[in-house]
Image: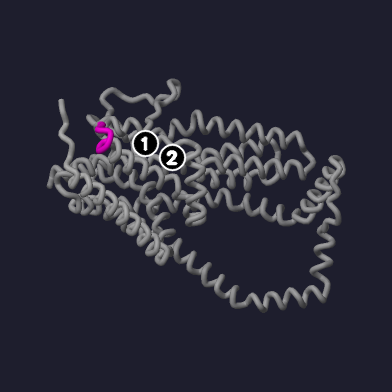
């Protein structure tokens, strides 16, 4: 079949359109970044609010299925979350406080032991570290009247900066208080927000928008809920293992490993580093080696068992892409950028990948989805037993994404029902 080439004027017009569209996209992106930087105070509470919405929405939807109004379900979810936080806090706070006080009392001794270990290591490998301050030297320096005057002068010069710092701390506290309020209204108005979003889409694109929105929502929900549960399990396993190893500050190290596991690749590495440092300072090299073995095992259990079970719906991202996204996110937005880097890249990969594969490569929606999204199966021995005819999706089941002919998650189902009503 012979294809008639486009006239030269049409080709030039198309090239010009592409160029101007690219220039317009760059200008819009630049303007968006400028505006986002000016109103950056809203992004932190908004990010935490979205995280709360993703975590609590399955509970609210489950209560809605049994005819409980969404407002009442949201209030119940908040009460349940508050009760859980209070219960966990009442169990952990006394132990954490005890270990923190012990750590504070042992800081001078730990510092001296670290200095002695560094000196001995330097002597063994032929490196002279020179004069190193001990804890007694530091105490004498602070007690020197001349140094005290210099410290007071520095504090006086820092007064205005300290005031600004105090204002910043108050603003951060206010920001964190706003996040639950924003999350409450977002949870209550979520169905209405979906309908409004659909109303803004041209009718011919609503089905496709519904499908892609379902893909994005399911992937982000699986990632956020999965990361929270994985962090909880990693923290618990780390604390229990270090307690069995009889390592000091086992609870603090385990909690740090769990919280930092919210950032990919960071939790077990940071926990292992802390455990090794404490073990070496305590003069227990065997425990240091065992700590490395323990955290390596926890990392493997996380990668091979825990994550495939909990976070079953995953977007295919290589480790290089994840690390680069963390670096870029941290450089652009600090801690917030690190936390939202992987979800943002996940969303972009789904949306941009769908457009490219359907518009350029000519693939179907299902083919584009299968090329980007991986749905892992339960291990055979851990596969849950389901009753015959029990096809209802569980509240925390993250396997929302199927083929084009199947239900593509709760979000997509709600969007498609809205389209049908319209």
Q: Earlier in the sequence, mark 2 or mark 1?
A: 2
Q: Which residues are magenta?
A: 358-363
Residue under the image location 57 percent in, 43 percent down: 267
Question: Left of 311 or right of it: where is 22?
Answer: left
Q: Which mark is drawn over residue 226?
A: 2
Query: How far across and how far down the image is residue 125, in percent?
Result: 84, 40
Query: How many marks overall?
Result: 2
Task: Please say if 9 is above or below 160.
Answer: above
Q: Residues within 10 Å of mark 1 (few under 14, many from 20)?
A: many
C-alpha distance separating marks 2 and 1: 8 Å
Look at the image and tell me in which quarter the N terminus lies.
Answer: top left
Marks 2 and 1 close (CB-CB < 8 Å): yes
Task: Please say if 353 is above or below 330.
Answer: above
Q: Is residue 71 visible?
A: no
Residue bearing mark 1: 398
Q: Secondary structure at mark 1?
A: loop
Query: How far across and how far down the image is residue 121, in percent?
Result: 82, 43
Q: Is residue 141 visible?
A: yes
Residue under the image location 37 percent in, 41 percent down: 349
Q: Residues within 10 Å of mark 2 (few under 14, many from 20)?
A: many
> Quick one: 232 or 209, which is closer to the camera?
209
The quadrant holding residue 309 is: top left
Question: Left of 387 or right of it: where is 331?
Answer: right
């Amino acid at each position: 079949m012979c294809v008639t080439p486009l006239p030269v004027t049409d080709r030039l017009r198309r090239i010009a359109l592409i160029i101007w569209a690219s220039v317009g996209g760059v200008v819009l992106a630049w303007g968006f970044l400028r505006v986002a930087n000016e109103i950056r105070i809203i992004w932190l509470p908004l990010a935490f609010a979205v995280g709360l919405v993703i975590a609590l929405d399955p509970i609210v939807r489950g209560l809605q299925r049994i005819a409980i109004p969404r407002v009442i379900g949201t209030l119940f979810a908040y009460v349940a979350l508050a009760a859980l936080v209070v219960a966990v806090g009442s169990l952990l706070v006394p132990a954490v406080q005890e270990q923190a006080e012990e750590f504070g009392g042992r800081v001078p001794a730990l510092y001296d032991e670290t200095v002695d270990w560094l000196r001995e290591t330097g002597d063994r490998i032929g490196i002279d570290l020179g004069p190193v301050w001990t804890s007694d030297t530091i105490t004498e320096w602070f007690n020197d009247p001349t140094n005290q005057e210099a410290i007071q002068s520095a504090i006086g010069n820092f007064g205005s900066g300290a005031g600004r710092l105090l204002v910043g701390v108050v603003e951060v506290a206010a920001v964190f208080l706003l996040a639950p309020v924003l999350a409450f209204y977002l949870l209550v108005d979520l169905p209405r927000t979906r309908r409004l979003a659909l109303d803004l889409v041209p009718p011919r694109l609503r089905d496709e928008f519904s499908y892609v929105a379902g893909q994005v929502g399911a992937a982000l929900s699986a990632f956020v809920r999965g990361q929270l549960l994985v962090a909880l399990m990693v923290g618990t396993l780390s604390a229990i293992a270090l307690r069995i190893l009889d390592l000091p500050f086992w609870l603090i190290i385990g909690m740090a490993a769990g919280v930092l596991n919210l950032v990919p690749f960071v939790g077990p590495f940071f926990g292992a580093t802390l455990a090794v440092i404490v073990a070496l300072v305590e003069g227990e090299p065997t425990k240091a080696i065992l700590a490395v073995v323990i955290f390596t095992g926890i990392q493997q259990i996380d990668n091979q068992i825990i994550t495939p079970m909990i976070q079953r719906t995953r977007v295919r991202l290589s480790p290089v892409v994840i690390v680069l996204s963390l670096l870029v996110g941290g450089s652009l937005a600090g801690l917030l950028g690190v936390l939202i880097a992987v979800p943002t890249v996940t969303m972009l990969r789904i949306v941009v990948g769908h457009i490219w594969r359907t518009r350029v490569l000519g693939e179907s929606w299902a083919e584009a989805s299968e090329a980007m999204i991986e749905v892992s199966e339960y291990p055979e021995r851990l596969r849950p037993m389901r009753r015959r005819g029990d096809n209802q999706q569980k509240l925390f089941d993250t396997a929302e994404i199927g083929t084009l002919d199947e239900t593509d998650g709760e979000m997509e189902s709600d969007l498609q029902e809205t389209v049908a009503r319209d």
